């Protein structure tokens, strides 16, 4: 048997799964103390821009395409995310300069999350 800790909608459960059978055995389904929340991301740099580059879908950051200080044109990729096994570039909404990158490769992101800012 293997023991796992699973978080569902903020509730933490200890689960035991029996190996080698077609059905799992669930035990200890009472919620346990909530796991500590991940530390908040550090605030954007003082030079953070007023133009937000936001994720259009949920996914995982696979590549940072533009560095802070880079000049980009509308439509240029700033960050690339992976969703449903597809790579989706998140483009600059208008011409400008990248002021901050607010994500890192490997981060899980949600729709509308700010991934970068521009001036």
Image (cartoon, rainbow, N blue to C red):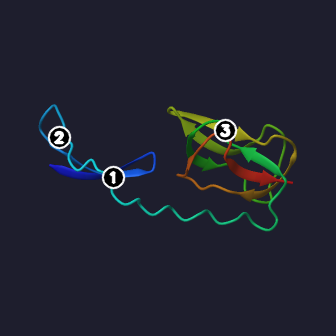
- Residue 83's spot in the image, x, y percent? 54, 35
The residue located at (23%, 50%) in the rendering is 28
The answer to whether residue 44 is left or right of residue 103 is: right
> Do the numbered discs 3 and 1 sit on residues whose CB atoms are within 8 Å?
no
Instruction: Choose mark 3 or mark 1, whichever is in front.
Output: 1
Q: Identify the residue position indicated by label 1 in the image.
A: 31
Q: Residues within 10 Å of mark 2 (few under 14, many from 20)?
A: few
Instruction: Choose mark 3 or mark 2, whichever is in front.
Output: 2
- Residue 69's spot in the image, x, y percent? 80, 59
Instruction: Reply above or below: 49 against 113.
Output: below
The residue located at (45%, 50%) in the rendering is 10
Label 3 or label 2, whichever comes before in sequence order: 2
Decide which of 60, 113 is in the foreground and name it. 113
Find residue 111 and report its image quarter: top right
> Do the numbered discs 3 and 2 sit on residues whose CB atoms are within 8 Å?
no
Quarter in which the C terminus is drawn:
bottom right
Q: Identify the residue position indicated by label 3 in the image.
A: 89
Instruction: Choose mark 2 or mark 1, whichever is in front.
Output: 1
Label 2 or label 1, whichever comes before in sequence order: 2
């Amino acid at each position: 048997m293997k023991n796992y800790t699973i978080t569902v909608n903020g509730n933490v459960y200890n689960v035991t799964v029996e190996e080698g059978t077609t059905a799992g055995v669930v035990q200890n389904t009472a919620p346990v103390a909530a796991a500590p929340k991940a530390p908040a991301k550090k605030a954007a740099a003082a030079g953070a821009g007023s133009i937000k580059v936001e994720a259009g879908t949920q996914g995982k950051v696979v590549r940072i395409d533009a560095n802070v200080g880079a000049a980009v044109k509308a439509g240029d990729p700033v960050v690339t995310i992976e969703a449903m096994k597809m790579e989706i570039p998140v483009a600059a909404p208008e011409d400008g300069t990248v002021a901050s990158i607010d994500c890192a490769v490997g981060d899980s992101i949600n729709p509308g999350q700010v991934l970068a800012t521009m001036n």
